[in-house]
Image (spheres, rainbow, N blue to C red):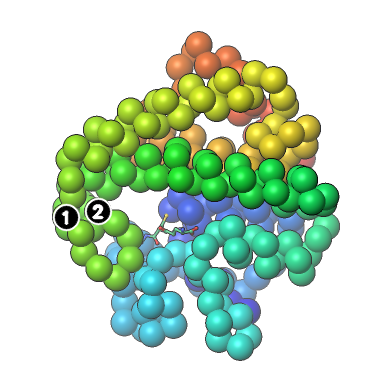
Amino acid sequence: MKLYTFDPAPNPARLKMFIDYKGLTIDTQQLDMAKAEQLDAQYRSIVPEATLPALVLEDGSRLTEVIAIAHYLESLHPERPLLGTTPAQRALILNWNHRIFNSLFMACAEAFRNSHPAYGSRALPGPNNYEQIPALAERGRSRLADGMVGMNEELTGRDFVAGDSFSFADIDLLAVLAFAKWAAKTEPGEDLTALLAWRERAGEALQA
Ligand SMILES: N[C@@H](CCC(=O)N[C@@H](CS)C(=O)NCC(=O)O)C(=O)O
Protein backbone atom coordinates (compact mmCIF):
# COMPACT_ATOMS: atom_id res chain seq x y z
CA MET A 1 0.00 0.00 0.00
CA LYS A 2 1.06 3.58 -0.54
CA LEU A 3 0.06 6.76 1.25
CA TYR A 4 -0.15 10.08 -0.57
CA THR A 5 -0.31 13.02 1.76
CA PHE A 6 0.94 16.49 2.69
CA ASP A 7 1.61 16.49 6.42
CA PRO A 8 1.12 20.23 7.10
CA ALA A 9 -2.47 20.29 5.73
CA PRO A 10 -5.26 19.78 8.27
CA ASN A 11 -6.72 16.43 7.15
CA PRO A 12 -3.28 14.90 6.54
CA ALA A 13 -2.28 16.25 9.97
CA ARG A 14 -5.07 14.22 11.62
CA LEU A 15 -3.80 11.10 9.94
CA LYS A 16 -0.17 11.83 10.80
CA MET A 17 -1.06 12.09 14.49
CA PHE A 18 -2.81 8.71 14.24
CA ILE A 19 0.14 7.05 12.43
CA ASP A 20 2.77 8.53 14.77
CA TYR A 21 0.82 7.59 17.90
CA LYS A 22 0.61 4.00 16.71
CA GLY A 23 4.26 3.99 15.60
CA LEU A 24 3.51 2.79 12.05
CA THR A 25 5.87 2.98 9.08
CA ILE A 26 4.10 3.32 5.73
CA ASP A 27 5.43 3.85 2.22
CA THR A 28 4.56 7.54 1.81
CA GLN A 29 4.80 10.20 -0.86
CA GLN A 30 4.36 13.85 0.10
CA LEU A 31 2.62 16.01 -2.52
CA ASP A 32 3.19 19.71 -1.99
CA MET A 33 -0.20 21.42 -1.83
CA ALA A 34 1.53 24.81 -1.93
CA LYS A 35 2.52 23.86 -5.48
CA ALA A 36 -0.92 22.31 -6.18
CA GLU A 37 0.70 18.92 -6.78
CA GLN A 38 -2.56 17.23 -5.74
CA LEU A 39 -4.02 18.53 -9.02
CA ASP A 40 -1.29 17.06 -11.25
CA ALA A 41 -2.55 14.70 -13.94
CA GLN A 42 -0.40 11.85 -12.68
CA TYR A 43 -1.89 11.97 -9.17
CA ARG A 44 -5.40 12.38 -10.59
CA SER A 45 -4.93 9.25 -12.66
CA ILE A 46 -4.45 7.39 -9.36
CA VAL A 47 -6.79 9.46 -7.15
CA PRO A 48 -9.44 11.26 -9.25
CA GLU A 49 -10.79 12.99 -6.12
CA ALA A 50 -7.53 15.02 -6.13
CA THR A 51 -7.56 15.25 -2.35
CA LEU A 52 -5.05 14.35 0.34
CA PRO A 53 -4.52 12.10 2.12
CA ALA A 54 -5.24 8.96 0.08
CA LEU A 55 -4.20 5.39 0.80
CA VAL A 56 -3.90 3.19 -2.28
CA LEU A 57 -4.15 -0.53 -1.51
CA GLU A 58 -2.34 -3.40 -3.24
CA ASP A 59 -5.32 -4.10 -5.52
CA GLY A 60 -5.43 -0.43 -6.62
CA SER A 61 -8.51 0.49 -4.61
CA ARG A 62 -8.21 3.80 -2.82
CA LEU A 63 -9.30 5.26 0.50
CA THR A 64 -9.73 9.03 0.45
CA GLU A 65 -11.34 9.66 3.85
CA VAL A 66 -9.12 9.95 6.92
CA ILE A 67 -11.55 7.96 9.05
CA ALA A 68 -11.56 5.07 6.53
CA ILE A 69 -7.76 5.05 6.32
CA ALA A 70 -7.56 5.05 10.11
CA HIS A 71 -10.02 2.15 10.34
CA TYR A 72 -8.05 0.14 7.80
CA LEU A 73 -4.74 0.75 9.57
CA GLU A 74 -6.23 0.01 13.00
CA SER A 75 -7.57 -3.32 11.70
CA LEU A 76 -4.06 -4.22 10.52
CA HIS A 77 -2.39 -2.83 13.65
CA PRO A 78 -4.75 -3.04 16.62
CA GLU A 79 -2.02 -2.16 19.14
CA ARG A 80 -2.49 1.20 20.90
CA PRO A 81 -6.15 1.32 19.84
CA LEU A 82 -7.56 4.71 18.88
CA LEU A 83 -10.91 3.62 17.49
CA GLY A 84 -12.32 1.75 20.49
CA THR A 85 -12.37 -1.86 21.56
CA THR A 86 -16.03 -2.33 22.51
CA PRO A 87 -19.14 -1.77 20.34
CA ALA A 88 -20.15 1.26 22.40
CA GLN A 89 -16.67 2.83 22.29
CA ARG A 90 -16.36 2.26 18.54
CA ALA A 91 -19.75 3.86 17.90
CA LEU A 92 -19.08 6.81 20.19
CA ILE A 93 -15.71 7.58 18.64
CA LEU A 94 -17.20 7.40 15.15
CA ASN A 95 -20.08 9.60 16.28
CA TRP A 96 -17.69 12.27 17.57
CA ASN A 97 -15.49 11.99 14.50
CA HIS A 98 -18.46 12.84 12.28
CA ARG A 99 -19.71 15.58 14.56
CA ILE A 100 -16.31 17.27 14.83
CA PHE A 101 -15.67 16.96 11.10
CA ASN A 102 -19.09 18.22 10.02
CA SER A 103 -19.36 21.04 12.52
CA LEU A 104 -15.96 22.38 13.59
CA PHE A 105 -13.74 21.14 10.78
CA MET A 106 -16.07 22.19 7.97
CA ALA A 107 -16.81 25.49 9.71
CA CYS A 108 -13.09 26.29 9.81
CA ALA A 109 -12.61 25.21 6.19
CA GLU A 110 -15.54 27.41 5.14
CA ALA A 111 -14.10 30.38 7.01
CA PHE A 112 -10.67 29.90 5.49
CA ARG A 113 -11.40 28.90 1.92
CA ASN A 114 -14.10 31.49 1.36
CA SER A 115 -11.89 34.38 2.49
CA HIS A 116 -8.23 33.67 1.64
CA PRO A 117 -7.16 35.30 -1.64
CA ALA A 118 -5.20 32.21 -2.68
CA TYR A 119 -8.45 30.22 -2.90
CA GLY A 120 -10.48 32.58 -5.14
CA SER A 121 -12.00 29.91 -7.38
CA ARG A 122 -10.85 26.97 -5.25
CA ALA A 123 -13.32 27.37 -2.39
CA LEU A 124 -13.75 23.59 -2.15
CA PRO A 125 -11.11 20.86 -2.47
CA GLY A 126 -11.34 18.40 -5.34
CA PRO A 127 -11.10 18.40 -9.13
CA ASN A 128 -13.79 21.06 -9.77
CA ASN A 129 -13.46 24.81 -9.24
CA TYR A 130 -15.98 26.69 -7.09
CA GLU A 131 -15.98 30.44 -6.46
CA GLN A 132 -15.75 31.79 -2.95
CA ILE A 133 -18.92 32.90 -1.16
CA PRO A 134 -17.85 35.54 1.40
CA ALA A 135 -21.00 35.02 3.50
CA LEU A 136 -19.89 31.43 4.10
CA ALA A 137 -16.63 32.71 5.61
CA GLU A 138 -18.62 34.82 8.05
CA ARG A 139 -20.94 31.92 8.89
CA GLY A 140 -17.98 29.56 9.23
CA ARG A 141 -16.36 31.81 11.85
CA SER A 142 -19.61 31.94 13.85
CA ARG A 143 -20.08 28.17 13.65
CA LEU A 144 -16.48 27.65 14.73
CA ALA A 145 -16.88 29.90 17.77
CA ASP A 146 -20.18 28.19 18.69
CA GLY A 147 -18.59 24.79 18.18
CA MET A 148 -15.82 25.60 20.62
CA VAL A 149 -18.35 26.68 23.24
CA GLY A 150 -20.26 23.44 22.65
CA MET A 151 -17.12 21.32 23.07
CA ASN A 152 -16.28 23.22 26.25
CA GLU A 153 -19.68 22.24 27.66
CA GLU A 154 -19.19 18.61 26.61
CA LEU A 155 -15.72 18.40 28.12
CA THR A 156 -16.82 19.85 31.44
CA GLY A 157 -17.98 16.41 32.53
CA ARG A 158 -15.29 14.05 31.23
CA ASP A 159 -11.59 13.67 30.47
CA PHE A 160 -11.65 12.92 26.75
CA VAL A 161 -13.96 13.58 23.82
CA ALA A 162 -15.45 10.08 23.59
CA GLY A 163 -15.19 9.07 27.25
CA ASP A 164 -12.48 8.15 29.74
CA SER A 165 -9.68 7.37 27.34
CA PHE A 166 -7.77 9.12 24.56
CA SER A 167 -9.05 8.25 21.09
CA PHE A 168 -9.15 9.36 17.48
CA ALA A 169 -11.95 11.76 18.41
CA ASP A 170 -9.40 13.68 20.50
CA ILE A 171 -7.04 13.77 17.52
CA ASP A 172 -9.88 15.22 15.41
CA LEU A 173 -10.41 18.01 17.91
CA LEU A 174 -6.69 18.70 18.40
CA ALA A 175 -6.35 19.01 14.62
CA VAL A 176 -9.30 21.41 14.41
CA LEU A 177 -7.92 23.70 17.11
CA ALA A 178 -4.55 23.83 15.34
CA PHE A 179 -6.30 24.49 12.00
CA ALA A 180 -8.52 27.21 13.51
CA LYS A 181 -5.52 29.01 15.02
CA TRP A 182 -3.70 29.65 11.74
CA ALA A 183 -6.52 29.50 9.21
CA ALA A 184 -9.31 31.35 10.99
CA LYS A 185 -7.24 33.21 13.62
CA THR A 186 -9.61 31.70 16.17
CA GLU A 187 -8.54 30.28 19.53
CA PRO A 188 -10.61 29.10 22.48
CA GLY A 189 -11.20 32.03 24.84
CA GLU A 190 -9.85 31.94 28.40
CA ASP A 191 -13.38 31.32 29.66
CA LEU A 192 -13.48 27.93 27.89
CA THR A 193 -11.60 26.35 30.78
CA ALA A 194 -12.72 22.76 30.22
CA LEU A 195 -11.69 22.88 26.56
CA LEU A 196 -8.30 24.40 27.43
CA ALA A 197 -7.68 21.82 30.18
CA TRP A 198 -8.68 19.04 27.78
CA ARG A 199 -6.22 20.39 25.17
CA GLU A 200 -3.37 20.04 27.70
CA ARG A 201 -4.49 16.55 28.68
CA ALA A 202 -5.00 15.35 25.10
CA GLY A 203 -1.67 16.84 23.98
CA GLU A 204 0.10 14.90 26.73
CA ALA A 205 -1.76 11.68 25.88
CA LEU A 206 -0.78 12.06 22.23
CA GLN A 207 2.92 12.25 23.18
CA ALA A 208 2.75 9.44 25.78
N1 LIG B 1 -12.95 14.12 3.85
C1 LIG B 1 -11.56 14.10 3.46
C2 LIG B 1 -11.08 15.54 3.23
C3 LIG B 1 -9.84 15.62 2.39
C4 LIG B 1 -9.48 17.04 2.07
O1 LIG B 1 -10.37 17.90 1.88
N2 LIG B 1 -8.18 17.30 2.03
C5 LIG B 1 -7.69 18.61 1.67
C6 LIG B 1 -6.43 18.93 2.46
S1 LIG B 1 -6.82 19.27 4.16
C7 LIG B 1 -7.32 18.60 0.20
O2 LIG B 1 -7.02 17.56 -0.34
N3 LIG B 1 -7.35 19.75 -0.47
C8 LIG B 1 -7.00 19.79 -1.86
C9 LIG B 1 -7.26 21.11 -2.49
O3 LIG B 1 -7.52 22.07 -1.77
O4 LIG B 1 -7.18 21.20 -3.72
C10 LIG B 1 -10.74 13.39 4.52
O5 LIG B 1 -11.32 12.84 5.45
O6 LIG B 1 -9.52 13.33 4.41
The residues bearing labels 2 and 1 have C-alpha atoms spaced at a distance of 6 Å
Depth check: give the residue in front, 138 or 2. 138
Q: Residue at x 54, y 48 (%)?
A: 98
Depth check: give the residue in front, 154 or 27. 154
How many labels were placed on the picture? 2
Q: Position of residue 154 (x, y in %)?
A: 61, 25
Q: Is residue 181 visible?
A: yes
Residue 102: give its label: none
Q: Residue at x 73, y 62 (%)?
A: 74
Residue 196 located left or right of residue 167:
left
The residue tagged 1 is 131
Helix, strand or loop at mark 1: loop
Name the kind of residue labelled 1 in the image.
Answer: Glu
**Up-down relation of residue 126 to residue 111 (above or below):** below
Quadrant for ligand 1? bottom left
Q: Image quarter for residue 107?
A: top left
Residue 80 located left or right of residue 206:
right
Q: Position of residue 91 (x, y in %)?
A: 70, 49
Helix, strand or loop at mark 2: loop
Depth check: give the residue in front, 88 or 189. 88
The residue tagged 2 is 123
Q: Position of residue 31 (x, y in %)?
A: 42, 68
**Up-down relation of residue 200 to residue 109 (above or below):** above
Q: Residue at x 63, y 39 (%)?
A: 170
